């Protein structure tokens, strides 16, 4: 299956091996959730280690360990769609981070909508009762 089919397709193909794949790298990572402070919308999920978290906090910009590219990834550095950290929270078991952010660009997701603009977040599809995925219309932003 191609990346485009995975990102735009209607077939549900959840990657239940993702955490095993991450564990197999030997990297010490925890999940980091990104949420828009203004709308409450969950924008994306990534992974951080100690170094990446320190970078994120120093830069005040969402930074992940890219499990796909195997490197530090400052979200939006190349596109201008950065996510400014307003607040950082830690869950009760200290096994996950929540970044509350303000968008400073078109969107947070690396994928593009039909009009070629960055999608607001990575959770742009919903599961229908028949088991297929459908794209959710993006809300209009003041900059659109």
Image (cartoon, helix red, strand yellow):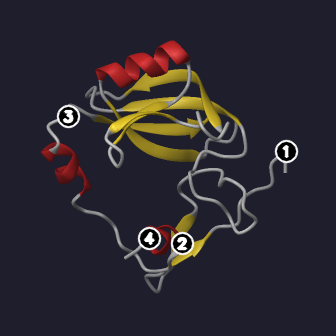
Q: Which residue is mark 1?
A: 143
Is tag 1's residue or tag 4's residue first in the polypeptide sequence?
4
Q: Residue at x 43, y 82 (%)?
A: 131
- Position of 52 with respect to 34 (left or right) is left
Q: Judge whether 47 appears above or below 132 on screen.
A: above
For marks 3 and 1, give the one nearer the viewer: 3
Q: CA distance from mark 3 to mark 4?
A: 25 Å
Dot 3, how many residues are within 10 Å of its Cα: few (below 14), some (14-19), or many (20+)?
Answer: few
x 54%, y 17%: residue: 59
Q: Nearer the viewer, residue 67 or 94?
A: 67
The correct choice, above or below, for 115 with respect to 66 in the image is: below
Q: Position of residue 72 (x, y in %)?
A: 39, 32
User: Contact (CB < 8 A) between labels 3 and 1?
Assistant: no
Disc 2 designates what residue? 8
| Residue at image point 76% right, 65% down | 115
Image height of 58 relative to 101, above or below: above
**Residue toward you, 47 or 78:** 78
Secondary structure of the residue carrying numbered label 4: helix
> Which residue does the image show at 64% across and 41% down from the upper left?
79
Is disc 3 placed on a helix, strand or loop? loop
Q: Secondary structure at mark 2?
A: helix
Q: Are marks 2 and 4 in contact (CB under 8 Å)?
A: yes
Q: How many marks?
A: 4
Q: Position of residue 83 (x, y in %)?
A: 61, 32
- Write down the residue under mark 3: 27
Mark 2 vs 1, N-terminal side: 2
Q: Which residue is mark 4?
A: 6
């Amino acid at each position: 299956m191609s990346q485009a089919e995975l990102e735009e397709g209607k077939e549900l193909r959840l990657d239940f091996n993702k955490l095993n794949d991450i564990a197999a790298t030997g990297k010490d990572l925890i999940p980091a959730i990104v949420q828009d402070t203004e709308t409450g919308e969950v924008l994306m999920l990534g992974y951080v280690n100690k170094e990446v978290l320190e970078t994120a906090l120093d830069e005040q910009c969402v930074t992940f360990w890219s499990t796909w590219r195997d490197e530090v990834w400052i979200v939006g550095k190349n596109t201008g769609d950065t996510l400014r950290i307003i607040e950082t929270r830690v869950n009760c078991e200290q096994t996950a981070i929540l970044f509350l952010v303000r968008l400073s660009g078109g969107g947070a997701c690396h994928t593009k909508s039909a009009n070629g603009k960055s999608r607001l977040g990575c959770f742009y599809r919903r599961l229908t009762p028949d088991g297929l995925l459908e794209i959710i219309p993006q809300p209009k932003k003041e900059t659109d």
